[in-house]
Image (cartoon, rainbow, N blue to C red):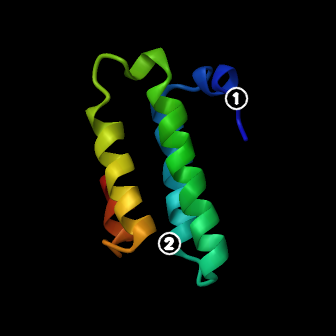
């Protein structure tokens, strides 16, 4: 797991890119266990981003993203592709 100190060295754009990468990987895999792990990783990265000062003034994007990923994780939504495209 990446540390907050290391994560803070990435720009907002790079942080979103890493999150999007996890979403893309999860969207392309059929194994449910691996899918869940990748989705958990994306949710964790959003959480770490929320602790980065760069996002303090306007965390809305991250909060909505976390909410949508959580819906996919618990099975309320299945459209991970649209989430990826929105990023």
- Labels 2, 1: front one: 1
Give 24 or 59, whichever is nearer the viewer. Answer: 59
Percent of width and height locating residue 75:
38, 74
Please state the total of marks drawn on the protein image: 2
Q: CA distance from mark 2 to mark 1?
A: 25 Å
Percent of width and height locating residue 3:
70, 29
The answer to whether 43 is drawn above or below residue 72 in the figure is above
Percent of width and height locating residue 4:
64, 25
Q: In the picture provided, is 7 more to the left or to the right than 61?
A: right
Query: Which residue is tagged 1?
Result: 3
The answer to whether 9 is drawn above or below residue 14 in the figure is above
- Residue shown at 69%/24% (left/top)? 6
- Residue shown at 49%/37% (left/top)? 47
Picture quarter containing residue 1? top right
Camera sees residue 63: yes
**Which comes before the other along the chain, label 2 or label 1?**
1
Query: Which residue is tagged 2?
Result: 27
Please identify the residue farthest to the bottom as the structure is shown: 30
Picture quarter containing residue 55? top left
Q: Secondary structure at mark 2?
A: helix
Percent of width and height locating residue 81:
38, 69
- Residue shown at 55%/68% (left/top)? 26
Picture quarter containing residue 61? top left
Camera sees residue 87: no
Crowding at dot 1, Cα within 10 Å, few <14 / some 14-19 / many 20+, comes out as few
Give 86 or 65, whichever is nearer the viewer. Answer: 65
């Amino acid at each position: 797991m990446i540390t907050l100190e290391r994560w803070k060295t990435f720009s907002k754009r790079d942080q979103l890119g890493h999150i999007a990468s996890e979403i893309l990987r999860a969207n392309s895999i059929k194994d449910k266990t691996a899918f869940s792990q990748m989705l958990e990783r994306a949710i964790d990265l959003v959480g770490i981003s929320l602790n980065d000062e760069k996002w303090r003034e306007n965390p809305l994007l991250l909060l909505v993203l976390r909410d949508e990923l959580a819906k996919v994780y618990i099975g309320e939504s299945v459209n991970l592709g649209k989430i990826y495209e929105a990023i």
